[in-house]
Image (spheres, grey):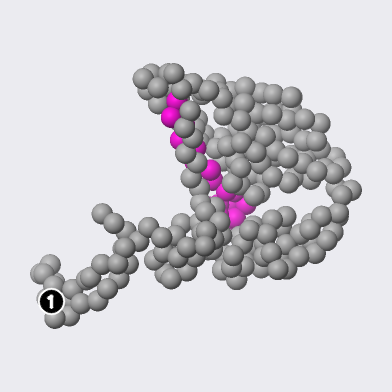
Amino acid sequence: MRLNTAGALNQLLAKRVLVVLAALLLASCRLVILTDETGRIDSASGTANCDQASCVIPIEELYSETFTAVAADGYRFVKWKGVCTITVIPICEVKLAPLTEQFAEFDGDVQLSAVFEPTTSKRAWYRDVDGDHYGAADKSTMAFEQPRGFVGNDLDCDDSNGAIYPRAQEQADGLDNNCNGRIDEGFVEARFFRDRDGDGYGDPASSRMELRKPA
């Protein structure tokens, strides 16, 4: 089974929903939702709610659902595991797509679960100035409850820019948009020529270098 999950941390529903697109290269498969006494997982449609040890959803065609991790009394959401791993908030949209029968030998299960922790445990919270759900590692506080303006992760590499966070789409702007330690990766430098008369042909004496995506 090969799983390709892409999502750039995408801010939807007032930055409350992170979309995770999972293209599963399977002829058919199952989404297996796992829960325990610390919380449950609800679905927006109401057809895939899970408050049991395990809930199985056969995937035989394009499947799209928004899941919410709901903590039991005395617990709080920490993180997702499985297909929603890259999502840092308790709401995650999942899209699964099986392929043709020629991939039948790759049948398998895709898991989804959430981790909760007791609210009686004190933990570190990180300042999230730009509101992108990713906190700054150098600005933290210890507390039992989540303070306003703080989040439970320290993954933001620029907390002054809401468009910069892990797995954001990289831009040709001289910045590390996706916090992977590299700048403008995926772009190449190309020469562009000035076309003053708009005939589609540039002036070889007037040009400049700019970054672009390879064709």
Residue 179: where, in percent of width, then height? 54, 61
Q: Is residue 211 above or below residue 109?
A: below
- Residue 4 appears in view: yes
Q: Does 15 appear in magenta?
A: yes
Q: Residue at x 37, y 58 (%)?
A: 186
Q: Residue at x 74, y 45 (%)?
A: 77
Tally the numbered discs.
1
Q: Is residue 6 above or below residue 113?
A: below
Report the span colored magenta: 10-26
User: Which quadrant of the structure image shows residue 153?
Assistant: bottom right
Question: Which residue position is annotated with label 1?
Answer: 204
User: Which quadrant of the structure image shows residue 207?
Assistant: bottom left
Pick out the residue farthest to the bottom.
205
Give the secondary structure at mark 1.
strand
Q: Residue at x 60, y 71 (%)?
A: 160
Pointer 1 local density, CA inside 10 Å: few below 14, some 14–19, many at least 20: few
- Relative to residue 95, is residue 152 drawn left or right? right
Q: Is residue 201 above or below residue 106?
A: below
Q: Does 164 appear in magenta?
A: no
